[in-house]
């Protein structure tokens, strides 16, 4: 009987661990002290979901940050092996959530099951990639310049440099990626890999998904012996919790994926602190695509079909959605616009993430169409249900676009604008006037690209990634990927928000001068106990000293 009771107790504990409670995670403890309660929304059924969520109180915020700071004191020095074990355990626990996570994701986002499963796979891949990175250890970028005591006229000291973590990091969940850019997404994975505890400000549109993933992270932390406070998850229905977190003196960096307005507000808050901190925000982008005449002439029909699919992919709710298409005015471009307009309305329209999202889409689309000179070429006209977005193609003359910055702004959703330029000189002038973007794309034949070298150069100076004969939608997670760009695509174009190099956002360089070998961190010791690649007196080597 005692054995049966024990098994039942374990099963109950397991169910309780994964059941959505609506509470915050303050370290490993659940907490619901706040008086403000909210629910998530299912845009497909156009109804609220059942679970209630408790917004974090000021006291809970303070406790989470205090725990994170305490955890940082020891976690920053954890070995790559231990952090790797933690990150892999998180991936394991996310996978163990099974269908409950997928179903919750879909009910809170309106996104299909296939997208949910793909994003879960990407999230796990990111975690395991960082696990491999920190286990290997080379990422700390160790440099050693040995002493030269006999150097004249002054002796040279022994100086050794490596990257060290910044401190507790606040990560804001993204509305359009409930998994890959949210609770255990790229920002969180990179910060934990760097040695920074993380406090997630969960996105209110998918708080249930966030809580489930948070429970997986907490279970992984307990399983691998991580310090209390290495991770916390705080609910918030508005901006108050995020504001308090960014302003807290023990928070040392912020990660954000979302709108220009939201990212800039956080950036300004962080800059006004007594000790300003970095905000790494990935924000708006219209991802310009340049179609050169010969390529359009040869492949216009196929390109129209491809780009109709890219514009409507995920109901246009990707930060890499192609919102601006450029071409040289003429019969070839006219034919492309006609074909694109026909193709786009043949695609079944999709559900947007939330009534607020589709409300903003319709408002911004209306504002764009109200601009003088912009023509609506095609829009889905069949009967649609609640929260379904009507995709649209518009067009405008190059001179009108050049003179009206309002036409340069993002319409988040399945919307694109074809800008008809008089010649390549006007095309180049327009690109130079664009705000910073995540991506730029060139559709061209090789010989044609050479003839438009000025356009290519202008595009390169406005984007973080340039694509040749492809589509911007789809961001490969690999070390060579740059997901960022000049402002306002991101707040710091020197860094990527995707791939293992994104760890560099959460660290700073630190030097030891004339430090005893036995007191140095392992990455800088003479013996090179980690066996990592280091720059020693300007030479890459794994040798000992």
Image: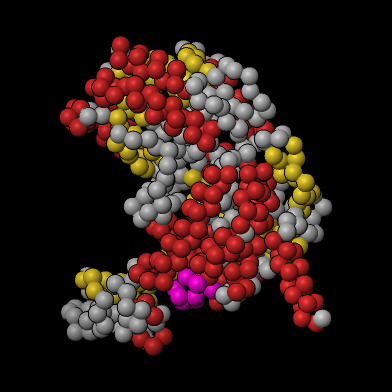
Is 65 positioned to the left or the right of 122 in the image? Answer: right
Q: Position of residue 327 (x, y in %)?
A: 33, 21
Residue at 41%, 52% in the rendered image: 477
352 up-or-down from 370: above or below: below
Quarter of the image with the N terminus in it: bottom right
Is 13 positioned to the left or the right of 525 in the image? Answer: right
Residue at 29%, 80% in the rendered image: 158
Residue at 41%, 80% in the rendered image: 521
Is 218 positioned to the left or the right of 406 in the image? Answer: right
171 up-or-down from 41: above or below: below
Quarter of the image with the C terminus in it: bottom left
Q: Is residue 262 visible?
A: no
Q: Quadrant of residue 361?
A: top right
Q: Position of residue 508 (x, y in %)?
A: 43, 64
Q: Position of residue 407 (x, y in %)?
A: 47, 23
Q: Does residue 84 belong to the magenta stretch?
A: yes
* Foreground residue among 135 and 396: 135
Residue at 50%, 54% in the rendered image: 121
What residue span does the magenta drawing correspond to? 75-85
335 up-or-down from 276: above or below: above
Q: Quadrant of residue 199?
A: bottom right
Q: Is residue 384 visible?
A: yes
Q: Position of residue 533 (x, y in %)?
A: 29, 72
518 up-or-down from 403: above or below: below
* Foreground residue among 533 and 308: 308
Q: Give the colour scheme shown.
A: secondary structure
* Foreground residue among 103 and 190: 103
- Magenta-colored segment: predominant secondary structure: helix
């Amino acid at each position: 009987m005692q054995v049966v009771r024990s098994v039942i107790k374990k099963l109950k504990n397991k169910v309780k661990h994964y059941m959505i409670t609506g509470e915050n995670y303050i370290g490993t403890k659940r907490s619901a002290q706040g008086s403000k309660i909210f629910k998530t929304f299912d845009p497909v059924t156009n109804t609220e979901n059942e679970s209630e969520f408790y917004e974090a109180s000021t006291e809970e915020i303070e406790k989470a940050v205090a725990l994170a700071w305490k955890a940082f004191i020891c976690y920053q020095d954890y070995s790559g092996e231990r952090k790797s074990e933690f990150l892999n355990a998180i991936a394991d626990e996310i996978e163990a959530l099974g269908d409950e996570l997928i179903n919750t994701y879909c009910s809170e986002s309106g996104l299909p099951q296939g997208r949910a499963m793909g994003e879960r796979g990407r999230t796990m891949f990111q975690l395991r990639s960082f696990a491999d990175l920190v286990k290997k250890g080379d990422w700390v970028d160790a440099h050693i310049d040995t002493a030269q005591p006999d150097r004249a006229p002054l002796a040279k000291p022994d100086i050794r440099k490596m990257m060290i973590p910044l401190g507790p990091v606040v990560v804001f969940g993204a509305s359009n990626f409930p998994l890959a850019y949210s609770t255990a997404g790229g920002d969180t994975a990179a910060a934990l890999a760097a040695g920074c505890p993380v406090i997630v400000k969960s996105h209110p549109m998918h708080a249930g998904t966030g809580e489930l993933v948070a429970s997986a992270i907490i279970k992984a932390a307990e399983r691998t012996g991580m310090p209390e406070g290495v991770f916390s998850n705080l609910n918030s229905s508005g901006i108050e919790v995020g504001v308090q977190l960014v302003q807290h003196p023990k928070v040392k960096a912020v990660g954000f994926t979302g709108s220009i307005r939201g990212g800039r507000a956080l950036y300004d808050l962080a800059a006004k602190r007594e000790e300003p901190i970095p905000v790494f925000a990935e924000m708006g982008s219209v991802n310009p695509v340049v179609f050169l005449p010969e390529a359009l002439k040869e492949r216009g029909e196929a390109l129209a079909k491809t780009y109709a699919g890219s514009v409507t992919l995920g109901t246009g709710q990707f930060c890499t959605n192609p919102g601006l298409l450029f071409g040289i005015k003429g019969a070839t471009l006219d034919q492309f616009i006609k074909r694109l307009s026909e193709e786009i309305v043949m695609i079944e329209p999709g559900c947007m993430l939330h009534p607020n999202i589709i409300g903003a889409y319709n408002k911004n689309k209306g504002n764009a169409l109200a601009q003088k000179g912009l023509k609506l070429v095609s829009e889905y006209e069949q009967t649609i249900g609640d929260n379904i977005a009507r995709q649209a193609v518009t067009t405008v003359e190059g001179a009108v676009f050049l003179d009206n910055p309002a036409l340069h702004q993002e319409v988040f959703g399945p919307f694109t604008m074809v800008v008809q330029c008089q010649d390549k000189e006007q095309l180049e002038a327009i690109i130079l006037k664009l705000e910073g973007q995540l991506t730029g794309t060139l559709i061209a034949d090789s010989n044609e690209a050479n003839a438009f070298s000025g356009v290519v150069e202008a595009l390169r100076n406005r984007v973080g990634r340039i694509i040749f004969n492809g589509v911007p939608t789809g961001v490969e997670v690999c070390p060579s990927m740059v997901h960022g760009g000049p402002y306002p695509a991101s707040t710091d174009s020197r860094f990527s928000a995707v791939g293992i190099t994104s760890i560099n956002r959460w660290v700073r360089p630190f030097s030891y001068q004339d430090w005893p070998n036995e007191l140095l961190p392992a990455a800088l010791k003479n013996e090179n106990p980690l066996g990592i690649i280091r720059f020693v007196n300007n030479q890459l080597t794994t040798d000992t000293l």
